Image (tube, helix red, strand yellow):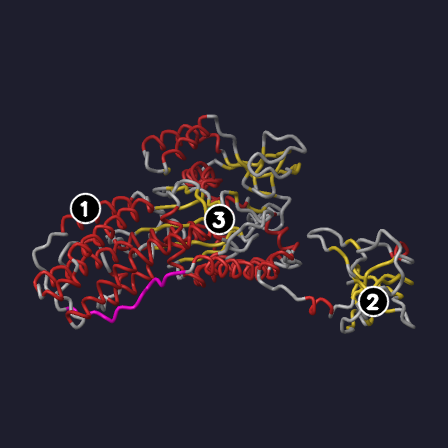
């Protein structure tokens, strides 16, 4: 059977992974498992990190780290996140990998040779956040995509003749109607291309953090030229590679469709390389109906959910609740409700009931089938589910499977095997339990792409020794479960969750994970996060902090440390305190003398730059800005205690 190569976007490392990235990567993992089930071989899933460009350079600077150190750190966060969630990633490609630079250069050389690249100069507005020139914007205008202010830049760049590809693209979209999915997105792209395409700059001279264009210093490649090529690098390039190119599917979020549906095919055509087979742009995940963003502080991370409810609960929820391709909402409450109703009560209950009854009545051996006919319904379920999966309609596929679970539940209730056991109707009892077990086998295989860990557990409980991963769609026919197969003791795969406790647990975990990520990125966590984490302190804790009013007596610069000032502060003690404070960028020493400040007076003394610091001065700490000293509007005596 043929190979299947699919990719996720190559994620920027300016932020640590959150549930938006996880959403795409989980869907990709589900598709990978599905493709294997359909018999593709090998199925290769590539992801990676997009590590160049100004946005990353600035994020690194804000974290007081070198670009390389910073990208190492965050790239590793992505790698770990996928590992924690047990995602079957075959290739994790970083754009800072030296072998990637060769691929990017190779693509550029081919485009240059074919005459689609030329040198030109540009003055205009640039959005650093989106790494995008905004040709229609005037100085001071916001970016039309993200609303952030654009910056004026003048650069001599290498240009790619995108304008030459308009007609070819339109013809291609028409000839290959499945290339862009879903349909609505395809229409957007067609409308965009019909407006006419301008040439795009594919190098930068104002940025250092990028892949250098060979022999063309100071040009570095534009991040999107760099990033898109990653899909080639991950499989060893297009030509000499592993025979995996072209990709069969690029799975992306809707906001980066234009780069994939317009730029990427044009780059590949110019380089005379084959195009990917399909793009699927899914929608946005919102948090409680609001856009998730760092500034709103409403981002959610996957690890705390996995720790509380299991990775499958998250996978199931995301793929069942959100129609793939449309925007959808994330809410903790809906997550737990879905888990309880569909997993604990629905599938979980069917599995434990069926297995327990086989143990009770047949000492754990699957009984022989009888005359009941579930084969037809099973067959339709399998066909509709696989058809929905094929169209990436996860929600519909799961709905179909759960409708069948409903049928099975009703079947068991009607047959009432507990009564059959009592009345001694052994033939009917055997038939009922065989039917339930065989249907459970089929259901388990069908849900495997979405909830692999739980499905594998049920599979093992059904007594199968071969891994579920090896199942193929051909195995989904009715009657393949052998009578006499020994099953394992039934144990609940989805314990019921108490909604309130579970939500609290996930929120606590989220707050802790946020603090961990922010610490890693060198950002000071917002106080509300610590409070949410349940890290409340009592009044007794607070009283331990000795806060005093002090008056600055002397202030001077600290040699070799441009952020530090050395102060002496009178807090009513026989000797003024010697305090070293990181406020030199905000305050001139002479402006501080005589000023009343707040001091933490009982901190253990420590040495900074050879000077003893006997306390800390209290200031508002502003992200990306200078500190502002705490003070008083009314006059206060030196040495007064704050409480
Ligand atoms: N580096 C580029 C992609 C280059 S691909 C050659 C980039 N990176 S990103 O880190 O911003 O990732 C964007 C992708 O993350 C989206 O396309 C989507 O797959 C996923 N998501 C990030 N936030 C999301 C939501 N809130 N909801 C759904 N997915 C989103 O763009």
Q: Which residue is mark 2?
A: 579
How far apart are the alpha carbons under marks 2 and 1? 77 Å
For mark 2, give the secondary structure: strand
Look at the picture and state if 323 lies above or below 198. below
Please give the name of the residue rendered at 10% of the width and 54% of the height, measured from the top-left corner.
372
Which label belongs to residue 104?
Answer: 3
Secondary structure of the magenta portion, mostly? loop
- In the rendered image, the quadrant that contains the C terminus is bottom right
Circles 2 and 1 in contact, beta carbons < 8 Å: no
Q: Residue 457's quadrant in the figure? A: bottom left
Residue 593 in picture, x, y percent from top left: 91, 58
Which label belongs to residue 380?
Answer: 1
Please give the name of the residue rendered at 21% of the width and 68% of the height, measured from the top-left corner.
463
Circles 1 and 3 in contact, beta carbons < 8 Å: no
Residue 503 in picture, x, y percent from top left: 48, 57
Q: Residue 570's quadrant in the figure? A: bottom right
Look at the picture and state if 446 lies above or below 457. above
Chain-order first, disc 2 or disc 1: 1
Chain-order first, disc 2 or disc 3: 3
How far apart are the alpha carbons under marks 2 and 3? 53 Å
- Residue 130 or 105: which is nearer the viewer? 130
Chain-order first, disc 1 or disc 3: 3
Please give the name of the residue rendered at 31% of the width and 51% of the height, measured from the top-left corner.
4
Confirm whether the magenta stretch covers residue 419. no
- Residue 574 or 422: which is nearer the viewer? 422
Q: Which residues are the magenta region? A: 485-497
For mark 1, give the secondary structure: helix
How far apart are the alpha carbons under marks 1 and 3? 48 Å
For mark 3, give the secondary structure: helix
């Amino acid at each position: 059977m043929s190979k299947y190569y699919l990719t996720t976007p190559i994620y920027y490392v300016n932020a640590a992974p959150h549930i938006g990235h996880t959403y795409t990567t989980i869907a990709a993992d589900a598709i990978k498992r599905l493709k294997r089930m359909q018999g593709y071989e090998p199925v290769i899933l590539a992801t990676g990190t997009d590590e160049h460009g100004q946005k990353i350079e600035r994020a690194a600077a804000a974290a007081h780290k070198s670009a390389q150190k910073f990208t190492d750190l965050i790239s590793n966060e992505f790698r770990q996140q996928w590992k924690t969630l047990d995602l079957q990633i075959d290739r994790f490609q970083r754009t800072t990998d030296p072998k990637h630079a060769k691929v990017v250069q190779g693509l550029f050389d081919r485009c240059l040779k074919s005459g689609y690249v030329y040198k030109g100069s540009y003055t205009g507005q640039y959005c650093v956040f989106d790494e995008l020139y905004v040709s229609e914007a005037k100085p001071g205008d916001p970016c039309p995509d993200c609303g952030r202010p654009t910056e004026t830049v003048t650069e001599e760049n290498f240009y790619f003749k995108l304008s030459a590809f308009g007609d070819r693209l339109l013809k291609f979209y028409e000839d290959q109607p499945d290339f862009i999915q879903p349909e609505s997105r395809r229409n957007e792209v067609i409308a965009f291309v019909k407006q006419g395409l301008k040439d795009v700059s594919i190098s930068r001279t104002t940025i250092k953090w990028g892949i250098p264009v060979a022999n063309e210093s100071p040009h570095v490649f534009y991040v999107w030229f760099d990033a898109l090529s990653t899909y080639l690098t991950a499989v060893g390039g297009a030509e000499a590679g592993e025979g995996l190119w072209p990709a069969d599917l690029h799975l992306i979020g809707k906001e980066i469709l234009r780069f994939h549906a317009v730029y990427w095919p044009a780059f590949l055509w110019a380089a005379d390389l084959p195009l990917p087979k399909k793009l699927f742009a899914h929608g946005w995940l919102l948090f409680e109906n609001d856009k998730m963003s760092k500034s709103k502080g409403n981002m959610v991370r996957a690890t705390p959910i996995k720790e509380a409810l299991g990775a499958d609960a998250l996978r199931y929820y995301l793929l069942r609740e959100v129609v793939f391709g449309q925007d959808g909402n994330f809410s903790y409450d809906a997550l737990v409700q879905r888990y309880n109703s569909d997993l604990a009560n629905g599938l979980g209950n069917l599995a434990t009931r069926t297995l327990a009854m086989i143990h009770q009545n047949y000492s754990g051996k699957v009984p022989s089938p009888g005359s009941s006919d579930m084969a037809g319904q099973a067959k339709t379920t399998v066909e509709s589910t696989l058809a929905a999966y094929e169209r990436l309609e996860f929600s519909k596929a799961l709905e179909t499977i759960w409708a069948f679970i409903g049928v099975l539940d009703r079947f068991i209730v009607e047959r009432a095997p507990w009564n059959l056991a009592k009345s001694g109707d052994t033939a009917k009892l055997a038939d009922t339990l065989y039917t339930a077990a065989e249907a459970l086998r089929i259901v388990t295989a069908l849900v495997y792409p979405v909830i692999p860990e739980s499905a594998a557990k049920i599979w093992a409980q059904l007594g199968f020794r071969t891994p579920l991963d090896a199942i193929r769609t051909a195995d989904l026919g009715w009657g393949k479960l052998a009578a006499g197969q020994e099953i394992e003791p039934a144990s609940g795969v989805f314990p019921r969750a108490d909604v309130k406790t579970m939500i609290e647990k996930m929120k606590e975990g989220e707050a802790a994970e946020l603090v961990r990520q922010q610490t890693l990125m060198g950002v000071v966590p917002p106080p509300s996060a610590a409070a949410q984490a349940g890290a409340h302190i009592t009044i007794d804790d607070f009283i331990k902090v000795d806060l005093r009013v002090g008056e600055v007596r002397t202030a001077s610069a600290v040699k070799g440390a441009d952020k530090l000032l050395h102060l002496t502060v009178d807090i009513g003690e026989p000797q003024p305190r010697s305090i070293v404070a990181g406020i030199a960028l905000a305050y001139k020493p002479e402006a501080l003398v005589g000023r009343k400040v707040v001091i933490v007076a009982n901190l253990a003394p420590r040495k900074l730059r050879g000077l003893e610091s006997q306390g800390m001065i209290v200031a508002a700490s502003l992200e990306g800005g200078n500190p502002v000293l705490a003070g008083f509007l009314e006059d206060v005596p030196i040495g007064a205690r704050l409480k």
